[in-house]
Amino acid sequence: MAGTPFRDGPAFLVTTSEDVYVPPANTYALVRQIHVANSNAAARAFSLWIGATGAEANGTEVAELKNVPANDYVDMYFPAGLKLTVTDFLVGLSSVDATSLAITVTGELYAA
């Protein structure tokens, strides 16, 4: 059965842990791509975790200080899907400022 495509973002990653994406009630998501664009003239880095709301915990990293070159982007692909349930929060932050890194999450939603 095919899922319903979704796109969340773009939204800026800020310098404190913040929820980036959580699936709606009664669904689960298969994230296929995470796109992070840097609009700054200097390189920036970001980190992502799967965990409780606003939480970052060792062992739950999806990306740790992943570098995004100046005026460029980084794409992370999950061909089999990065499964997130309604209790899984994709949490992220920018290493430097709150106005350089924009994140977009895409994939499919399925009924839980």
Image (spheres, helix red, strand yellow):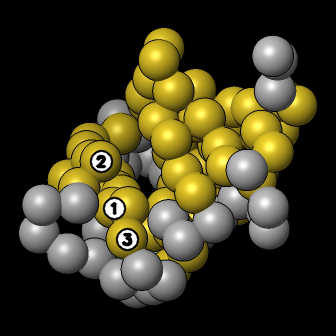
- Above/below status of 100 relative to 108: below
Mark 2 to mark 1 CA distance (whole Å): 5 Å
Kind of residue sitting beneath label 1: Trp
Evaluate if marks 1 and 3 touch, with contact meaning CB atoms under 8 Å apart: yes
Residue 111, position in %: x, y? 81, 45
2 and 1 marks in contact (CB < 8 Å): yes
- Disc marking residue 62: 2
**Disc number lying in front (1 or 3):** 3
Q: Locate residue 108 relative to residue 76 in the image: left or right.
A: right
Identify which amino acid the numbered label 3 is placed on.
Gly
Q: CA distance from mark 1 to mark 3?
A: 6 Å
Query: In percent of the image, x 28 and y 77: which residue is there?
Result: 56
Q: Give the quadrant of the N terminus.
A: top right
Earlier in the chain: of badge 2 and badge 3, it is 3
> In the figure, is residue 8 to the left or right of 67?
right
Secondary structure beneath dot 2 equals: strand
Residue 54, by quadrant, is bottom left
Question: Residue drawn at (79%, 61%), measured in percent from left and top?
Answer: 26
Q: Earlier in the sequence, mark 2 or mark 1?
A: 1
Residue visible at 30% across and 48% down? 62
Crowding around mark 1 (Cα neighbors within 10 Å: few <14, some 14 to 19, many 20+) is many
Q: Which residue is mark 1?
A: 49
Q: Is residue 37 above or below residue 14?
A: above
Which tag is nearer the camera, tag 2 or tag 3? 3
Three-letter code for the amino acid on which mark 2 is drawn: Val
Of helix, strand and loop, which one carries label 1? strand
